[in-house]
Image (cartoon, rainbow, N blue to C red):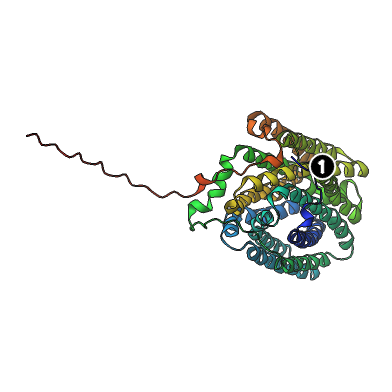
Amino acid sequence: MTGRHDPYAAFRVEDYRRYLGGWIVALLTYRIQGVAIGWEMYERTGRPLALGLVGLVQALPLIALALPAGYLADRFDRRRVLVVSLAGMTAASLGLAAVSHFDGPIPLMYALLFLDAAALSLGRPARMSLLPQLVPRGIFPNAVTWNTSMWQVASVVGPAIGGFIIGFTPAIAYVLAALGSVFYASLLSRITIRKDVAAPERISRESALAGLRFVRRSRGLLAAITLDMFAVLLGGATFLLPIYATDILRVGAHGFGALNAAPAAGALFTALVLAFRPPLRHAGRDLLLAVTGFGVATIVFGFSRSYPLSLAMLFLTGAFDNVSVVIRHTLIQLMTPDQMRGRVSAVNGIFISVSNELGGFESGVVADAFGPVASAVSGGVGTIAVVATVAAFSPELRAVGALHATKVADAEEERPQPVSRPRPPRRRARVRLP
């Protein structure tokens, strides 16, 4: 790299500031809503399985709609797709507020969570693909790092506010989530998109599945997102926090908010460190070490009966996990041609949904059968086993070096090729002998 590293390069782009400001407000209020959902479900049912079902009903639409949403993000104006998504999320949040206020049936809350996840799935690839169109390629890793930093700020502040709000009534949290979505949509209308020239593809099964084929061919990228998926799937201890706060650590609603904020505080610390230093030069190695640390911290948290120690371990899980977030998201966006970013982001969204929401379902089921401690500890052990397996069988991931030197992969193989018909052989002219 030449020149001096500018840690604030992304913030010098006005459109990026608008995009980030709206997204952070929406995310902050969405985190408040998430805390309220977990607390209210466990308070009203008393079953760990109820928390697992929250993850399941959110995972199903996120997985089922990811590929169609990715195609929409590449076919239509990404801002409009995202605004439609935000409208659906607003409606779902207002519905949750009404059900909570009137003490409505639990199945109706699950139905509204399903609707909310479907709307989120519709806009996720568009949002993830929008960022490279707002900032120059040279400062994109810096934008990703600040994105994760601000994401963690919202994830620290959101649960803390949520823990305070649920002491009064969870319905306020759902109303705030609706207002945050509306605010984000209003700022999206004020940004300017830098468009790369690329001919749109015809609607076909081949073009819709192009993102899957692209990720499958990019073995280093596939290994990175697979590693992250299984690590979070098995180590999803955060879904067990209502149980730990209520039955194990006995810290109440305010302590529950702090436990939720601890992973985000750790991730924020890491993100700020990464923002003020040049891009990682040994990204593959660093990713493997970070996920290993995530697994170890999860094991210690599972055994802990000390509130300060539990907070410290959750802080470390967030710190290690953020390294994975920065590396994976940077690789996806910089390796992918613009005309395919929506579909590749959709594939990444499937992996995220499997790891987060289905990870919560897995944690809830295991906790319901064997207890929360067994669920958390076995998840951490499984994470370390996954790291060992990926490290052994993926030399492509181990070879990933500097993030700023990442090159766009060739997408020509992913475009449908015209069917060529064989030409009939030419007839040789007969030479008549005299």
Find numbered disc 1 in the image and state the secondary structure of the residue it sits on.
loop
Which corner quadrant of the image does residue 77 belong to? bottom right
Question: Quick check: 93 above or below 412?
Answer: below
- For the point 49% across and 51% down, which residue is it? 206
- What residue is disc 1 on? 277
Location of residue 353 in the rendering, given as x and y in whole percent from the top left corner: 67, 50
Q: Nearer the viewer, residue 332 or 124?
A: 332
Location of residue 140 in the rendering, given as x and y in whole percent from the top left corner: 71, 49
- For the point 81% across and 46% down, which residue is it? 275
Location of residue 178 in the rendering, given as x and y in whole percent from the top left corner: 76, 67
Question: Quick check: 290 above or below 325?
Answer: above
Which corner quadrant of the image does residue 235 belong to? top right
Question: Quick check: 30 above or below 361?
Answer: below
- Amino acid carrying mark 1 in the image: Arg
Q: Quadrant of the N terminus?
A: top right
The residue furthest front is: 434
Q: Is residue 295 left or right of residue 425?
A: right
- The crowding category of the residue bearing disc 1, from other C-alpha atoms within 10 Å (few below 14, some 14 to 19, many at least 20), is few
